[in-house]
Amino acid sequence: MAERGVVLSLDEGTTGATAVAVGLDGRIRGKGYAEIAQHYPQPGWVEHDAEEIWAAVQRTALDALEAAGAAPRDVRAVGITNQRETLVVWDRKTLKPLTRAIVWQDRRTAAECTRLREAGHEDRVRQVTGLVLDPYFTATKLAWVLKHVGGATDAAVGTVDSWLVARLSAGRDHITDASNASRTLLFDIESGAWSDEMAALFGVPLANLPEVRDSSGEISRTDAAAFGGIDAPVGGIAGDQQAALFGQACLAVGMAKNTYGTGSFVLMQTGADRVHSASGMLTTVAWRRAGRLSYALEGAIFITGAALQWLRDGLGVIASSAEAGPIAASVPDSGGVFVVPAFVGLGAPHWDPYARGTIVGLTRGSGRAQLVRAAVEAMAYQTRDVVEAMEHDTGRPLSELRVDGGAAVMDVLCQFQADLLGIPVRRPLQTETTALGAAFLAGLGAGVWNDADLVDLWKIDSEFEPRMSRDQADSLQAEWRRAVDRSRGWALTDNQSL
């Protein structure tokens, strides 16, 4: 490979598209970013414009190459990582979306999930898919589209990775990888194939779904005319959280990472062992390589970084998300204020789509700094709830937590997280681990790197050791859980369902 060769990673997230050009040494050489507009047509509905997503991916890819001093011909492989569960529906011939993408945060199918749960399907769904009946996942979104969008029965459907591959390949390939397929409620994670049983349960045809391929290898290839002159293999695909697990080099059983993004997602590597959770965790496919599935336990927290966006855009408490860290660090604690950011319900371990955002503990002494600190601390409290559930499921205490994502740059968050968990929190030198994971998968698939290289490519930046006593940490967590109980007291009645 030429020295200037790069692996191009396309990271299409919930709030924006990021592209990074990764050099042969595993370091990010260039980056591009574009924000994605959020659409809220009704309460509880969250949508994206799929054409805007594609335009943002194209633009950021070229920006990343330019920043790296690289040209389209220098791209040796392309990796894709994406917001998961989000549904895109498009015309197979024209590649035009039939409707806006329905985002993973969308709650419009909460009532349908409740109906299926009350009909007694929850246990079987968990057994086959590793997931719970929640509007978070793709199947009920697809069922809704088939009922309400004209032409959908003959359309191509898929998660965002499938949409991007369709556009990158000029419509040639309709595919997904096993990690994204495992987030749909339609994939049998034991057999590694689409489930006829689940398709029948949700009333969706398997013929609309993409072909499932490995997460690394010869997956697809870009069409130069469709993708800015880039003609390269698509060597890696993974859902964003699985990509972050890979990018954090959590390859040994028992290793775990947390990504603090729009939401937060804790994943623990379980290898070939498919752990059945009794604590509200999800069992998910981490990745599939050479036809072999690797699994992970996952705790999906719906709102963490998005709470800071709410403080910025909804309340005007902060001018930018970057202010949150310094403001939170300006006070020693939250002054007894707790923010439960259940704006779209609660994810793991509660799985309550009807919970609502709550602020408790306000006094006349509560001010801007205490409110911001409480929103930051909520990220750590929710993470501890998930970590304790994972430890219960596996019988394996966590020895460290590797962290990444935009909010991980805040020392105040990382230190508080270490204090609550009582274990070291380690932040890597390169915090764009989601994009790096996709790049590593692509580079492995294209022969740029081998497995032994991955551990060497991961470098630590900062380590946070716990300073708080266990009694104090436990007392704070107990207060947090009382605040969560308050948020769940706002459950909607059946005739008020979203």
Image: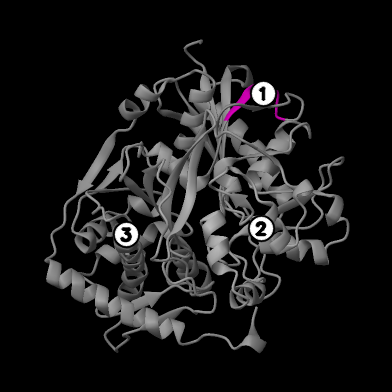
The spot of residue 231 in percent (x, y) is 68, 21
Quarter location, residue 39 = bottom right
Residue located beneath label 2 in the image: 198
Mark 2 or mark 3, which is nearer the start of the sequence? Answer: 2
Residue located beneath label 3 in the image: 387
The front one of 283 and 145 is: 283
**Local crowd size for mark 3, using a 10 Å CA cut-off: few (<14), some (14–19), many (≥20):** many
Q: Secondary structure at mark 1?
A: loop
The spot of residue 469 in percent (x, y) is 11, 66
The front one of 11 and 159 is: 159
Quick one: which residue is furthest to the top in this view? 2
Magenta region includes residue 232: yes
- Quadrant of image for the C terminus: bottom right
Q: Secondary structure at mark 3?
A: helix
In this view, 124 is above or below 183:
below
The spot of residue 143 in percent (x, y) is 74, 63
Please state which of the two labelled residues, at mark 3 or mark 2, is closer to the viewer: 2
Q: Is residue 21 left or right of residue 382?
A: right
Mark 1 or mark 2, which is nearer the start of the sequence? Answer: 2
In this view, 361 is above or below 429:
below
Residue located beneath label 1 in the image: 230
- Type of amino acid under label 3: Val
The spot of residue 237 in percent (x, y) is 57, 36
Q: Label 2, label 1: how many angstroms apart (C-alpha)?
A: 38 Å
Please state which of the two labelled residues, at mark 2 or mark 1, is closer to the viewer: 2
Magenta region includes residue 472: no
The front one of 28 and 222 is: 222
Circles 3, 2 touching at the beta carbon (< 8 Å): no
Residue located 57% across and 51% down the image: 84
The magenta segment = 227-235
